[in-house]
Image (cartoon, helix red, strand yellow):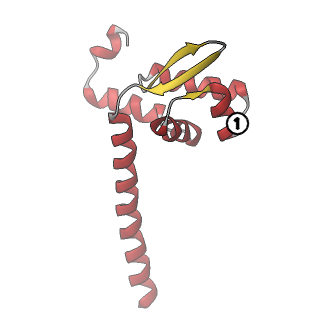
Amino acid sequence: MDDSQIDQPLYVAKAQLFRSLSHPVRIRILELLVVSDMAVSALRDEIGVEASSLSQHLAVLKHAGLVVSRRRANAVTYEITDACVAEFLASARRVLASTMGRTRSTLEHLESQ
């Protein structure tokens, strides 16, 4: 993290974090890494994207400080930086469940009228 990121308002930092999460492939990468550390080749096989695309997504997550890489023999392995990443994903799931539940309830109410 460079000094310009440290001196910015918290809401700007949050927006940057959310931007780093704004692609389904990145979310899937994090979901897999919450379960266990994975080599790039295993991530590529599991997600089914081109190596260059996966590399770009991993770079975004790494720049955001959400994952770190480690070289193990001939393979590069990625892992989440903190258990808070898992908690964050679980919180996002709860928010989605809540908002979708309200949407479903509203739709059912409208259809019943």
Left or right, 39 with respect to 84, comes to right
> Where does residue 2 sit, x and y in percent of width and height?
37, 9
Vertical arrangement, residue 95 with respect to residue 32, above or below: below
- On screen, residue 79 versus residue 51, left or right, reads left
Name the one closer to the observer, 82 or 5.
82
Residue farthest along the front direction in this orientation? 73
Identify which residue is drawn at 43% across, 23% down.
Answer: 64
User: Which residue is the extreme one toward the top?
Assistant: 3
Q: Residue at x 63, y 33 (%)?
A: 43
Q: Secondary structure at mark 1?
A: helix
| Quadrant in the rendering for residue 96 | bottom left
- At 33% from the left and 32% from the top, the residue drawn is 14
Hey, which residue is sitting farthest right in the picture?
A: 50
Residue assigned mark 1: 45
Instruction: Name the quarter where the C terminus is drawn.
Output: bottom left
Residue 23, image x, y percentages: 55, 39
Pick the front one: 32 or 14: 32
From what the image shows, is residue 109 above or below residue 17? below
Quadrant containing the N terminus in the rendered view: top left
